[in-house]
Image (cartoon, rainbow, N blue to C red):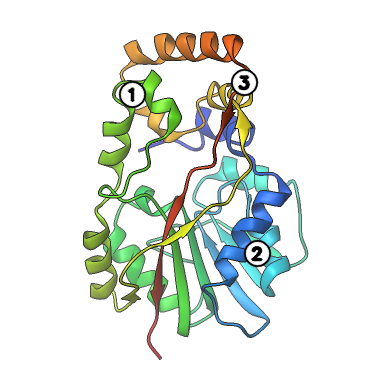
């Protein structure tokens, strides 16, 4: 398990913060899969440092609840208060909200951290209103991206794939929990291209959970080679990767 109350919680903002433009791109992608009416109440499950919560409040115009088990991450999120947002301690397996209390549940790169995913999805169904949607932005072991920095860390692609379940397995878990999954994932391109130098500066703080599982012998040599390439070709543009998101619906 990654300890987000430890080192990761302290460096996450430096390595994973999102510009407002990218948040808007993502919230537009979420809105395209959600009911059209407004306001909608939203649960950001595994809200971390609150990268999306204010943007979700602006997009959906209802109450937004950020549920996050890490106290360190919640403290960072609460430094930017928003009148439409409440941050709550809790977990995916025990969501501190009443039944049928939200219209949208966002799980943004959090599902693979849930200790008990079956129980978590039952909780997601419980808090969703009939006709509501759960948006699972996740990787899937059979649909993994080929990230540019994998070439510097030989085990990274295998480590990352090992964190995630195959799409079919996730869809089966969702059905067992009473949720209806879409047949295929939604593919989203959201982000801004960064230079190799900018990408190195974000990666070097090791705010991706991948680095918590890599052999120590790979990490320093990998960053040394990446630093050399960033020094040699700092303006090389790294394109934005295509992301995958699975949409789950609570039947009416």
Identify the residue at horizontal 41%, vertical 91% (top origin).
252
Task: For label 3, count other residues whose C-alpha is less than 10 Å away and answer few (under 14), some (14-19) or many (20+).
Answer: many
In the image, residue 81 lies at what x, y percent?
Answer: 76, 55
In the image, residue 21 lies at what x, y percent?
Answer: 71, 50
In the image, residue 222 lies at what x, y percent?
Answer: 41, 14
Q: Earlier in the sequence, mark 2 or mark 3?
A: 2
Quarter residue 170 falls in: bottom left
The reply to whether residue 78 is in sight is no
Identify the residue at horizontal 60%, vertical 10% (top origin).
231
Label annotation for residue 214: 1
Badge nearest the viewer, 3 or 1: 3
Q: Which quarter of the image is occupied by the N terminus?
A: top left
Task: For label 1, count other residues whose C-alpha is less than 10 Å away and answer few (under 14), some (14-19) or many (20+).
Answer: some
Q: Which of 71 and 215 lies nearest the eye of the viewer?
A: 215
Q: CA distance from mark 2 to mark 1?
A: 33 Å
115 left or right of 30?
A: left
| Badge 2 vs badge 1, beta-carbon distance below 8 Å | no
Reading the image, the residue beneath label 2 is: 56
Work out whether 87 lies above or below 202. Answer: below
In the image, residue 114 lies at what x, y percent?
Answer: 36, 52
| Badge 2 vs badge 3, beta-carbon distance below 8 Å | no
Reading the image, the residue beneath label 3 is: 197
57 left or right of 34?
A: right
Q: CA distance from mark 3 to mark 1?
A: 22 Å
Q: Earlier in the sequence, mark 2 or mark 1?
A: 2
Element under disc 1: loop
Residue sticking out furthest to the bottom: 252
Element under disc 3: helix
Q: Earlier in the sequence, mark 3 or mark 1?
A: 3
Label annotation for residue 223: none
Quarter residue 211 falls in: top left
């Amino acid at each position: 398990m990654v300890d987000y109350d430890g080192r990761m919680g302290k460096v996450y903002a430096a390595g994973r913060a999102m510009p407002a433009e990218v948040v808007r791109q993502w919230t537009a992608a979420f809105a395209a899969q959600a009911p059209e009416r407004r306001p909608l109440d939203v649960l950001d499950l595994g809200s971390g440092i609150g990268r999306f919560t204010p943007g979700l409040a602006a997009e959906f115009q209802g109450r937004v609840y950020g549920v996050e088990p890490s106290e360190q991450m919640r403290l960072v999120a609460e430094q930017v208060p928003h009148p439409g947002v409440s941050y709550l301690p809790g977990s995916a397996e025990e969501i501190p909200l009443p039944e049928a209390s939200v219209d949208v549940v966002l799980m943004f790169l959090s599902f693979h951290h849930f200790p008990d995913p079956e129980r978590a999805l039952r909780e997601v169904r419980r808090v969703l209103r009939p006709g509501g949607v759960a948006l699972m932005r996740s990787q899937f072991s059979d649909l993994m991206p080929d990230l540019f920095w994998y070439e510097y860390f030989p085990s990274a692609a295998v480590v990352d794939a090992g964190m995630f379940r195959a799409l079919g397995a996730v869809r089966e878990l969702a059905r067992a929990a009473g949720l209806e999954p879409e047949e295929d994932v939604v593919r989203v391109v959201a982000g801004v291209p960064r230079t190799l130098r900018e990408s190195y500066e974000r990666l070097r703080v090791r705010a991706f959970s991948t680095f918590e599982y890599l052999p120590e012998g790979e990490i320093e040599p990998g960053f040394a080679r990446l630093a050399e390439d960033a020094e040699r070709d700092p303006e090389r543009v790294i394109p934005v990767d295509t992301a995958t998101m699975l949409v789950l619906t609570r039947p009416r």
